[in-house]
Amino acid sequence: MARPKAFLPDQALEKAVNLFWRQGYEGSSIDDIVQCTGLGRGSLYDTFGDKHALYLAALDRYCVTGGEKLTTLRLQSGSVRDIFQAFFQALIEEALADPEHRGCFLVNATLEMAPRDPEVASRVQAGLDDTREAFYHVLIKAQASGELAWTRDPHQLAHYLLNAYLGLRVLSRTNPDRRLLEDIVTTTLSVLS
């Protein structure tokens, strides 16, 4: 009969999310993971597999939280400009409140791991697709309400907004300057006029 685990795997995974988010895959050694989670190597490997499997689980966990934010975005009511203003402003506030300037774990994974790791690339692509689709959904609602002209291509606008989102996420990590980030949002939202 197997012994019950003396730790909570979800808590250990949450700690791993924060470690990988802060330090990346390459910057996080097994010793870092053991120290951060408080797990012994045996428990770590028995529960999560190897470092790569734990990284994928951490990325999946992060994407679940991101998915909840996208669901909220889809359900927002109000003008399309107000909806995206609130979405991007919340992103800026979150970034500026983070003393470690971690940016976005998904974007960090895009830059660090996706170019050479097909499993990470697949998860990254799914996250980006979900984000673009949420943007598209809001734009289609704006067209249906008559707020956004039918001559505007919602696919192109969703791609543009995704690009702005990714740029904000990168800049918020490398140069977390409120005025710079808010200027980008102001210019981005001008395409919705």
Image (tube, rainbow, N blue to C red):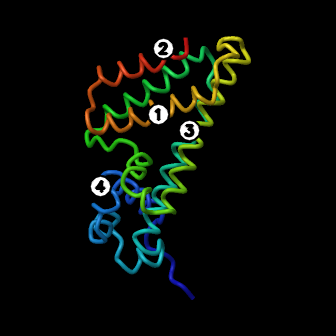
Residue 148 point in image, percent of width and height? 65, 14
Q: How far apart are marks 3 and 1 (CA)?
A: 11 Å
Mark 1 surroundings within 10 Å by alpha-carbon count, few (fewer than 14), some (14 through 19), many (20 or more): some
Front residue (pair 155, 43) = 155
- Judge left or right: residue 104 versus residue 179: right
Residue drawn at x 42%, y 31% as measured from the top left: 91
Whether residues under marks 4 and 3 lie with C-beta atoms below 8 angstroms apart, the answer is no
Sequence-first tag of 2 and 3? 3
Residue drawn at x 62%, y 36% as measured from the top left: 133
Residue topped by disc 3 = 131
Whether residues under marks 1 and 2 lie with C-beta atoms below 8 angstroms apart, the answer is no
Q: How far apart are marks 4 and 3 (CA)?
A: 24 Å
Sequence-first tag of 3 and 1? 3
Is 109 rendered above or below residue 190?
A: below
Sequence-first tag of 2 and 4? 4
Residue topped by disc 2 = 190
Which of the numbered marks, if any, corresponds to residue 68?
Answer: none
Residue topped by disc 1 = 163
Q: In which quarter of the image is residue 169?
A: top left
Q: Distance between the residues labelled 1 and 2?
A: 15 Å
Q: Distance between the residues labelled 2 and 4?
A: 35 Å
